[in-house]
Image (cartoon, grey):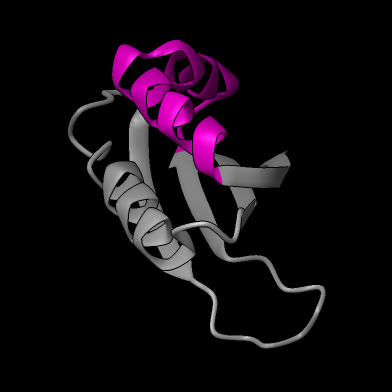
Amino acid sequence: MVVHIVMFRFKEENKKPNIIQAKQMLENLMGAVPSLRSMDAGVNFSTEGRAMDLSIIASFESKEGLDAYAVHPEHLKVIDFIKTVVEYSKVVDYERI
């Protein structure tokens, strides 16, 4: 099992609506991307300065599944939107043994 974690910091302009839209778009990838086994998207409520705004935890059967997700047309649509509303993101990928 491969776990893919991404945390996003959004731009201030239209921040709340953009977070909600991105969350929904990410959740909609379940069923649309065959290699995606699970998708958990959460909006942050922490007020700490180091907090991120939105995070996802997705899982795949293999690294190949993650690679297929990365280039899937539906995922690329989400990336296109996120690139316009996010300041930056951080990612962690690992194999669960």
Say whether residue 61 is visible.
yes
Quadrant location of residue 18?
bottom left
The x, y position of residue 2, in whole percent, is 58, 37
43 over 11 or under it: above or below: below
Q: Quadrant of the N terminus?
A: top right
The x, y position of residue 84, in whole percent, is 52, 34
Say whether residue 96 is visible.
no
Left or right: 29 in relation to 87: left
Left or right: 40 in relation to 46: left
Point out the stretch of residues depicted in magenta.
Answer: 60-85
Q: Which of 30 and 46 lies nearest the eye of the viewer?
A: 46
Main secondary-structure element of the magenta-colored stretch? helix
Q: Which of 15 and 61 lies nearest the eye of the viewer?
A: 15
Q: Which of 91 and 87 lies nearest the eye of the viewer?
A: 87
Q: Residue at x 76, y 85 (%)?
A: 48
Q: Residue at x 29, y 43 (%)?
A: 25
Disc count in the image? 0
34 over 83 or under it: above or below: above
The x, y position of residue 49, in whole percent, is 81, 79
Q: Residue at x 27, y 36 (%)?
A: 29
Left or right: 35 in relation to 31: right
59 over 46 or under it: above or below: above
40 over 94 or under it: above or below: below
Q: Which of 62 and 13 lies nearest the eye of the viewer?
A: 13
Residue 88 falls inside the magenta stretch: no
Q: Residue furthest right?
A: 50
Q: Residue furthest front?
A: 13
